[in-house]
Image (tube, rainbow, N blue to C red):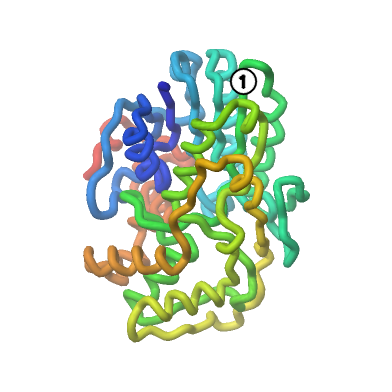
């Protein structure tokens, strides 16, 4: 099976691609590589690729593939808030256009990396795939709109599937520190502090990026009738945590650290618990292998191995929004998040 992975050089994609190759898939990537200067630890597995912004994808780019795994986009709430118009163009409009082109090209499966951010201010209730959308950020809104529009494209020859990932964590060649578990462990390791920016009460489902990749592979392996135009919450029910519980796990993992709440910290309106029973029941090949404790240990050990410093952790290299602002301020990207010249794409 020949697969196109958009965003193959991002946080999830750099881990997913080797897993797809190990399964014997023929994989091609498509990525503008905004984070070429942000590689963490060991290098990235190279595959045939199209160096292209997803806003510029053409029919010829998606021809000849059996499936498109669409990961690319502005990757989190703060980055989405930086310019809601660009979030609309990149995360929503470009994603829908790629799905339309894939359908036109005869691509059979389109797997979209959606998000549990769709549920937004979900409160204390358990939310399943039929629960109401309640996004509270441009990022969440964009994911909802893609699902709604692409679902209308489904027919006998084109099967979209929507994987609503819980909050991601885990080590990647394109590591991010703006994710809750990655962030808390980095604070604990570099500063001896588990620093919580809310009051610790919000619920958040979390899932390792390796298990997200397993979900994509499970969809590729599943019979068409099981995944056709279906949405799945990606994670496990037992991996819904309150932020304060994650803080305790980190405190137990990283020696000589303490928990501290930000001054005036209050509840975060992004609060939701998700029911992941459907993916477990419908996709028996999906076998998650990670939990928060194991993930915290993995993160702590890699931070130790590379000697992570506070300056690296708080700097612009691995913080998505800070890195984008750095590229813009140094005239590497323009305000539309496009590379200024071909030469500036080269890693310095």
Q: Nearer the viewer, residue 250 or 286?
A: 286
Please give the name of the residue rendered at 43% of the width and 37% of the height, measured from the top-left corner.
Answer: 7
Query: Which quadrant of the view contains residue 298?
Result: bottom left
Relative vertical location of residue 74 with respect to residue 245 in this rendering, above or below? above
Residue sitting at 55 percent across and 36 percent down? 90
Measured along the vertical axis of the image, is residue 290 above or below residue 1?
A: below
Residue at position x 56%, y 53% in the image: 235
Q: Nearer the viewer, residue 41 or 157?
A: 157
Residue at 61% x, 29% y is: 160
When asked about the image quadrant of residue 186, the answer is: bottom left
Image-based side of 243 in relation to 7, left or right:
right
Please provide percent x and percent y for residue 220: 50, 31
Left or right: where 27 falls relative to 280: left
Q: 167 and 90: which one is in front?
A: 167
Q: From what the image shows, is residue 289 above or below residue 213?
A: below
Return the x and y of residue 144 as percentages of the image width and height.
68, 42
Q: Is residue 238 visible?
A: yes
Can residue 331 be spotted in the picture?
no
Position of residue 150 relative to residue 309, above or below, is above
- Quadrant location of the C terminus in the rendered image: top left
* Residue for badge 1: 158
Q: Quadrant of the N terminus?
A: top left
| Kind of element beneath mark 1 | loop
């Amino acid at each position: 099976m020949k697969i196109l992975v958009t965003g193959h050089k991002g946080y999830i994609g750099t881990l997913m691609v080797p897993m797809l190759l190990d399964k014997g898939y023929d994989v091609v990537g498509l990525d503008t590589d905004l984070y070429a200067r942000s590689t963490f630890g060991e290098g990235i597995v190279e595959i045939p690729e199209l160096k292209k912004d997803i806003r510029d994808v053409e029919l010829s780019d998606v021809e000849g593939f059996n499936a498109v795994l669409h990961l690319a986009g502005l990757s989190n709430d703060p980055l989405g808030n930086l310019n809601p118009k660009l979030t609309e163009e990149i995360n929503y409009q470009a994603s829908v256009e790629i799905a339309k082109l894939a359908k036109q090209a005869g691509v059979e499966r389109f797997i979209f990396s959606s998000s549990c951010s769709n549920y937004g201010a979900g409160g204390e209730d358990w939310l399943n795939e039929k629960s109401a959308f309640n996004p509270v950020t441009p990022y969440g809104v964009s994911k909802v709109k893609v699902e709604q529009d692409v679902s209308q494209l489904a027919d006998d020859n084109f099967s979209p599937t929507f994987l609503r990932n819980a909050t991601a964590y885990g080590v990647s060649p394109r590591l991010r520190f703006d994710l809750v578990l990655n962030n808390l462990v980095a604070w604990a390791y570099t500063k001896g502090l588990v620093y919580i920016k809310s009051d610790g009460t919000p619920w958040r489902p979390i899932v390792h990026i390796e298990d997200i990749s397993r979900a994509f592979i499970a969809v590729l392996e599943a019979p068409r009738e099981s995944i056709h135009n279906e949405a799945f919450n990606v994670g496990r029910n037992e991996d819904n945590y309150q932020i304060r519980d994650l803080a305790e796990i980190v405190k137990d993992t990283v020696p000589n650290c303490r928990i501290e709440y930000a001054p005036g910290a209050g509840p975060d309106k992004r609060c939701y618990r998700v029911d992941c029973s459907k993916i477990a029941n419908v996709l028996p090949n999906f076998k998650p292998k990670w939990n928060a404790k194991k993930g915290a240990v993995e993160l702590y050990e890699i931070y130790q191995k590379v000697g992570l410093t506070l300056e690296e952790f708080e700097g612009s290299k691995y913080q998505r929004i800070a890195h984008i602002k750095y590229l813009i301020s140094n005239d590497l990207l323009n305000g539309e998040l496009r590379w200024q010249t071909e030469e500036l794409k080269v890693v310095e």
